[in-house]
Image (cartoon, rainbow, N blue to C red):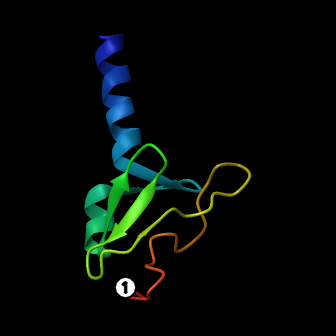
Amino acid sequence: MASQEASLYMQTVWEEARVGQRLLSAKQLEKAGVRIHNKYDLSLECLSCGEIWSPQRHSDETLPRGYWKCPNRCNW
C-alpha cells in the first residue's frame, strides 16, 4: 500500500508544478494555453506559438507568479 501511495504521489508531482502552496495541474496549464514540455527540468511549451521556456525558480524552489505566461505574450 505504501508503494502505491508513493507512486501516486510521484505521478502527481510530475503532473503538477508548485507555485508557493498552490499546485497547478497539467489540465489547468492547458487551459492557460501551455503544456509541460519536459517534466524533469520543468520546461513549458506555448500551445499557440510553440515557444519553449524554463521558468526561473526562487531559492526555495517555488515558481514565480505568472510562470506559465509565454515569453511572446500569447497567453497574457
Q: Position of residue 21 (x, y in %)?
A: 56, 53
Q: Vertical placement of 58 versus 15: above or below?
A: below
- The picture quadrant where one finds residue 8 is top left
**Please, what secondary structure does the residue beneath circle 1 have?**
loop
Q: Is residue 41 left or right of residue 47?
A: right
Task: Name the residue located 36 percent from the left edge and 87 percent from the top edge.
Answer: 74
Above or below, 31 relative to 20: below
Q: Is residue 29 left or right of residue 42?
A: left
Tell me the quadrant of the picture where the N terminus can be found: top left
The quadrant holding residue 48 is: bottom left
- Quadrant of the image containing the C terminus: bottom left
Residue picked out by circle 1: 75
Q: Out of 64 and 5, give the one closest to the viewer.
A: 64
Which amino acid, by three-letter code, is at mark 1? Asn
Q: Which residue is painted at 35% across and 40% down in the image?
A: 12
- Rendered location of residue 46, percent (x, y): 33, 74
